[in-house]
């Protein structure tokens, strides 16, 4: 692998944003470690590739699961935040969730890079990464390296570009 230490990456975003579809392009082949750990009404997906250990979690609205994903915060070195760029109505929810994540005591002071996927770019009328950036108020993130790129999780287009940026920040 290109890293000589294991790095934990949190993949997070609203439900239906495309997290599961997107990580299918990052995931190793079926023979490698891949685990879905279901808890009551909730599942956490984990897999490792090139010493990058991915934990995929849905911020599935319901706040009763919040403590579940929050317990991962202390261990993470990077965040991948997936946004459905066709879902203009819930972009403010995505924005609020992001704010809550970045202000969490375990994340606030951390210099972890944050990669944003403006996903579903193939859908006509999808917002551009620039529009998503503005609506999400990303310019206000000043203590972390961040990057936004558009993606089509169905084809994997844009995924490698984003992951390359992240890997570069983690070296
Ligand atoms: P939950 O697990 O329910 O939180 O959702 P998720 O974030 O894992 O999203 P998922 O990968 O299940 O994708 C949700 C829906 O969007 C599915 O029907 C996908 O096929 C579709 N989808 C995901 N990414 C894209 C994309 O880039 N373009 C298009 N057109 N559809 C996408
Ligand atoms: Mg999913």
Image (tube, rainbow, N blue to C red):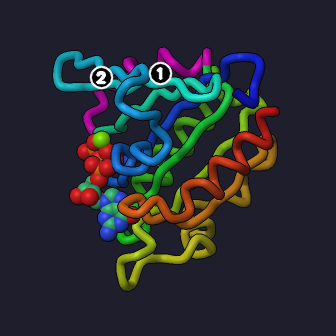
The answer to whether residue 91 is visible is: no
Does the segment drawn in magenta span residue 107? no
Identify residue for label 2. Answer: 36
The answer to whether 12 is drawn above or below residue 126 in the figure is above
Element under disc 1: helix
Q: Magenta stretch? A: 61-75
Ligand 2, seen in the image, is in the quarter at top left
**Where is residue 121, by image quadrant?**
bottom left
Label 1 neighbour load within 10 Å: few <14, some 14-19, many 20+ = few
> Marks 1 and 2, Cα distance to the nearest angstrom?
18 Å
Identify residue for label 1. Answer: 70
Residue depicted at 51% across the width and 18% down the height: 72
Residue depicted at 47% across the width and 27% down the height: 55
The answer to whether 131 is drawn above or below residue 145 in the figure is below
What's the magenta bit mostly, secondary-structure-wise? helix
Q: Of label 1 and label 2, which has the lower sequence position?
A: 2
The answer to whether residue 11 is visible is: yes
């Amino acid at each position: 692998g290109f890293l000589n230490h294991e790095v934990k990456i949190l993949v997070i975003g609203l439900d239906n944003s495309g997290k599961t579809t997107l990580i299918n392009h990052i995931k190793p082949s079926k023979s490698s470690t891949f685990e879905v750990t279901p808890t009551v009404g909730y599942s956490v997906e984990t897999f490792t590739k090139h010493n990058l250990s991915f934990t995929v979690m849905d911020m599935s609205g319901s706040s009763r699961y919040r403590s579940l994903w929050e317990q991962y915060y202390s261990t993470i070195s990077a965040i991948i935040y997936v946004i459905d760029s066709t879902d203009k109505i819930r972009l403010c929810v995505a924005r609020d969730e992001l704010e809550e994540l970045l202000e969490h005591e375990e994340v606030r002071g951390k210099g972890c890079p944050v990669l944003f996927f403006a996903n579903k770019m193939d859908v006509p009328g999808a917002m551009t990464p620039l529009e998503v950036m503005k609506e999400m108020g990303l310019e206000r993130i000043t203590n972390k390296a961040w990057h936004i790129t558009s993606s089509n999780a169905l084809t994997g287009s844009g995924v490698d570009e984003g992951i390359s940026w992240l890997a570069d920040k983690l070296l």
